[in-house]
Image: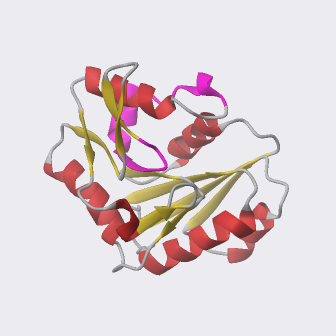
Amino acid sequence: MKPKFSIVIPVYNHLEDCLKPLLASVYAYTDLGEAEVLIIANGCTDGTEDYILGLNDPNVRLIRFDNAMGYPRAVNVGIQNARGDYIVLLNSDCVLQNQNKQDWLNLLVRPLEEDPKVAITGVTEIYDKNSGYDFIIFFCAMIPKLVFAELGLLEESFGMGGGEDIEFAIRAQRAGFLIQQVPIKTSELWSYHTWF
């Protein structure tokens, strides 16, 4: 059965301190009958690949590369291999908090289903003073696959990451789309290790 959601998680090592806690929370709070998880092993040398293969879960797919190629390229490979209608960009250092199954995905997808002009939802919206545009930070964001088909993938010139979310949000808004932060305190359903 085709999944509704494709959760794309690029990883570069940090199996024990990041990926394992994240996947445990994904299993706890996500209906994998409706979602697939794509782990993009981006030059990992810490046993990440063996761990994912050892899960033996058809809902969790591994795409591996011998060398680190940077965040935007890894995400783009995930998007290109995704089967779901909605792409979730999720950093490996996030952890979903206690909630009902599917709450986090339902919260992210609701604005997209209610208004076809909304192209990006996420938990943190910031104003970029240099460009004059708001953007959603891609540590936890949802974008319909059809939007990528219309606008193209992430800009890979950012290399190791940092700025591709701003550029994509600008592109989307210039094309007439909207972005929307989901109306909830970030720490209620998920946390980001670096910030919370």
Taking the image as shown, residue 190 lies to the left or right of residue 59, namely left
189, above or below 98, in the image: above
| Residue 101 lies in the magenta-colored region | no
Q: Residue 166's x, y, as percent?
A: 43, 30
Where residue 141 appears, as percent x and y from the top left, is 40, 49
- Along the viewing direction, whichever of 18 and 146 lies nearer the viewer: 18
Magenta residues, as a range?
Answer: 137-159
Residue 138 against residue 7 in the figure, above or below:
above
The residue shown at (23%, 57%) is 183
Q: Position of residue 105 (x, y in %)?
A: 34, 63
> Viewer-proximal residue, 67 or 193?
193
Could you tell whether 1 is left or right of 94 in the image?
left
User: On the image, which quarter does residue 109 sit in?
Assistant: bottom left
Of 130 and 161, nearer the camera is: 130
The residue lying at 46 percent from left, 56 percent from top is 6
Magenta-span inclusion, residue 150: yes
* Number of marks: 0
Q: Residue furthest right?
A: 45
User: Which residue, as the protein is rendered here, is positioned at the far left?
Assistant: 114
The x and y percentages for residue 125 are 33, 43
Quarter of the picture containing the N terminus is bottom left
Q: Is residue 64 above or below residue 107?
A: above
> Which quarter of the picture shows residue 68?
top right
How was this image coloured?
A: secondary structure
**Residue 166 or residue 150, whichever sits in front:** 166
On the picture, is 19 further left or further right than 138? Answer: right
The answer to whether residue 58 is visible is no
Residue sitting at x 26%, y 22%: 175
Query: Residue at coordinates 31% horizontally, 25% vertically from top-left?
Result: 133
